[in-house]
Amino acid sequence: MNAKRTPPRRPKPLVTQGEARSRSRGRADAPTVRTRSKAARHPIVVFLNFMLFLVVMGIIGGVAALVIGREAFVTAGPLTETVQVNIPRGASVQSIARGLEEQEIISNRYVFMAAAYASGATKAMKAGEYVIDAGESMEGVLSKIVSGAVVQHKITIAEGLSSAQVVARLNESDVLTGRIRQIPPEGSLLPETYSVTRGMDRERVLKMMQDAHTTALNEIWQARDQEIPVASPADLVTLASIIEKETGQAEERDRVAAVFVNRLNRRMRLQSDPTILYGLYGGDAWAQGRTIYRSDLDRPNPYNTYQIAALPPGPIANPGREALKAAANPAETDELYFVADGTGGHAFARTYEEHQQNVARWREIERQRRAATAGSTE
């Protein structure tokens, strides 16, 4: 019997076909590893990337700061009550901001300065005294300082003061600054109430008064009665100054003016007591009460209208607007005399006889007053 032989099995290969191919090429397959290019690792590229990062972060930070700063700029401030603050002349925005912060008017000086620089307000900020309301924002404070809406102070110069008295009044003011180098000519200032700001120079205020006088005098001179015996605006001021010192009652001014104009037309002496005082004491004549003695009437001086039949050589004070108007347009009357009547006004007369009667009544009033005074001191 022929036995059936089983073919022998092939031995299992030690490597796969793929591995064999790999080995046949002399290397084995390995995982792929990617490396950065040399250009990406270059220091300049690294630096530029870092700078871009900083720029982006700076923009983000700047926008955030702008938003926060803007909010702080318009938000109500820390003040709890209204105050006045003085911005000195020539102060820098840094010193202004620091002062406002120290006084707790603003909450952050740097926000205030940044807004001032950004808006161009640093060159528009004006010195002066400002009212800052409670809770006012930095925006409101800066707006006020730029607008120049400063506090206005009033200085009142009374009619009939001498120029020396006016200068003394200005020197007494703690609102004004500077020094007046020279007393202006008598009668060159217009007595009125003037608005001034803190820190204003005294010479500037004096110039305001002189300009106001010139303007008023020109207007009044143009509207004068052409028949008055006054040759020039300067003479009109002289006459007005005498009227001013003779009466303090507004309703009497044009009547007193008429008496002096009538006497000038008749070449009579004005016989005004204030002119004697000014001739003796000048600008100090009105600084304190002075008594005129009989001997003073006979003492020669160029202002003594008991001796000269004309106007004195210049004003004896600074007349107000109403006295100037009265001198330019006196009342229509033929009265030649007046004397005090005991009420603060005067009794007027056309004749010397009437005048003597008025004088007698005035002397009786004076006698009674002296007697009453003597009785009260016993």
Image: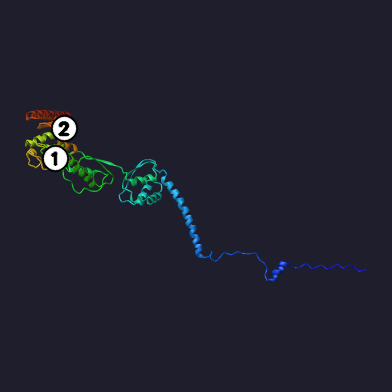
Q: Secondary structure at mark 1?
A: helix
Residue receiving disc 2: 252
Q: Quadrant of the C terminus?
A: top left
- Badge 2 amino acid: Glu
Asked where in the image residue 311 lies, by quadrant, the reply is: top left
325 or 365: nearer the viewer: 325
- Badge 1 amino acid: Leu
Q: Residue at x 48, y 55 (%)?
A: 57
Q: x, y percentage for residue 81?
A: 37, 40
The answer to whether the residues at label 2 and label 1 have Cβ atoms under 8 Å apart is: no
Residue receiving disc 1: 236
Q: Vertically, is 279 above or below 358?
A: below
Q: Are there few (<14), some (14-19), or many (20+) residues within 10 Å of tag 1?
A: many
Asked where in the image residue 82 lies, by quadrant, the reply is: top left
104 or 315: nearer the viewer: 315
Q: x, y percentage for residue 229?
A: 10, 38
Asked where in the image residue 227 lies, by quadrant, the reply is: top left
Is 146 displayed left or right of 314 in the figure? right
Q: Secondary structure at mark 2?
A: helix
Q: Are there few (<14), some (14-19), or many (20+) residues within 10 Å of tag 2?
A: some
